[in-house]
Image (tube, grey):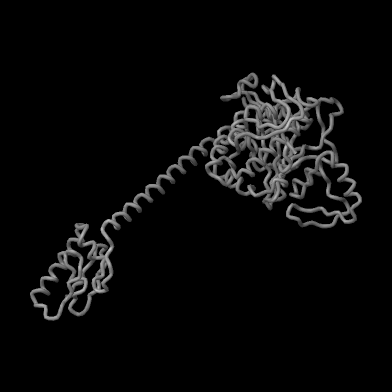
Amino acid sequence: MDADVTDTAGTPSEPDGPAGGGEAGKDAGGESSGSAPGTEPGADAGTEADAADTGAGTDSGADSGAAADAGDGDGADGEAETPKHKRHWLRWAALGTSVVVLAAAGVGWWFYRKLDANITTDTTAAAELQTYEKERPRPVSLEAQNILLLGSDTRSGAGNSKYGRDDGGSQRSDTTILLHIAADRQSATAMSVPRDLMVDIPSCRKPDGTRTKPQFAQFNWAFEFGGAACTIRTVEGFTGIRIDHHMVVDFRGFKAMVDAVHGVEVCLKEPIDDADAHLRLRAGKQKLNGEQALGFVRARKSIGNGSDTERMERQQQFLGALVKKVQSNGVLLNPIRLYPVLDAATKSLTTDPGLDSLRDLYDLTRSIRNVPTEKVQFLTVPRQPYSADPNRDELVEPEASELFKRLREDRLVRVVPDKDKKNKKAEDKNAETPTDEKPDGTGSVSPTPAPTFSGTNAAVGMCE
């Protein structure tokens, strides 16, 4: 036979001997008839005609039975053919798998788009900062990241009105934290800035387009004057640290994040009853939901000595407990548990254009998710009562400048509890060869011991 015979896949069947009686000789049932000795010429001609018909039927898309089986079976070798029902099952399995994969991809894409759309971009701050680019400090460590976290006390927006009156959308930075992420991604230092710290605030653009005059005032006025841009320029002015990104989170977002991780455990030495903070808690160990947690970090008059200093320390301890809860429960590695956290965070999050997408936030989170909890440190800018007004704060020098320099140069910051700081200073003074290390462990012997700062870390729980 001169022409090759094709199977259902369109692949030429190999001839089985000179007479071509192998594949071509298969009958309609798919069994091999072969060319037995003594076969008459008429039989050969009929076999070739049948083979030609089979090939034609396959090309036209007909068959499902004999022609398909004829292509797969190997009558010459005597191998068993694939049953028809098995072939159908495989086809349905492939189709089902494809549908599942496409559905999963579609759902994943929907979740991504939803979370991405939740984030608000602060283009106004970006434009203002670009105007003053020449005045801003230059980054010293290009791989390190400095992110300014702003907790807005705005009463505007759903769920925020019950915390006070909305004075035409005015807001102040109820909490301000400079988060320094080391270049090697092995440590992170969160430095709180007191709201009552007296600082130089530059001329800032107000929401109505007018500008304020440069003035020496309490720090949280900067956010009220000119939002994130004014606050960033103020922080850069007294620290010399270049701010790479910023995030603003309101009351609603904070509550939602705590609820998304199913609450955070705290321990109280005394019961709390604070009407202003909408908070009533018993003494002892207990788990706070979002609403209770917000009251806990905002309460001031009814806890301790009522100072903002003590409130900041409480905020740091709570944030450390929140970080510990997220890491210990594997939230960052479990998409099902991570989604509610991301949804809660992004719904009330305003960022600069460099962090305004889910991919940007994911890359940032992924880069620091393996930082040990004991290397996630919290401290407050070294300060003391302002000489002209004890209700305000001022920087303690040269300690504050030393802290700013170490963060600026991405050097190791050593944080110890306040009660241990004096002992630590004594140890450093008696050390023969104190070392001033970088976060990666390298460094050189220095005649002056690396300073320590009062603070805590995420490994120290509030109930320990």
Image location of residue 353, percent across then percent down: 58, 40
Q: Does residue 215 appear in this view?
A: no
In front here: 276 or 231? Answer: 276
Image location of residue 390, percent across then percent down: 84, 26
In front here: 382 or 43? Answer: 43
Position of residue 409 in the picture relative to residue 107 (left or right): right
Q: Quadrant of residue 55?
A: bottom left
Position of residue 131 in the picture relative to residue 64 (left or right): right
Q: Does residue 326 appear in this view?
A: yes
Q: Quadrant of residue 10?
A: bottom left
Position of residue 67 in the picture relative to residue 210 (left or right): left
In front here: 198 or 436? Answer: 436
In the rendered view of the protein, which quadrant contains the C terminus?
top right
Residue 296's place in the image compared with 428, above or below, is above
In the rendered view of the protein, which quadrant contains the N terminus?
bottom left
Residue at 63% x, 41% y: name it.
Answer: 326
Residue 374's place in the image compared with 200, above or below, is below
In front here: 47 or 162? Answer: 47
Image location of residue 448, percent across then percent down: 87, 51
Circle count? 0
Residue at 27% x, 65% y: name it.
Answer: 81
Q: Quadrant of residue 87?
A: bottom left
Residue at the farthest right position: 430
Residue at 71% x, 50% y: name it.
Answer: 141
Image location of residue 323, percent across then percent down: 66, 41
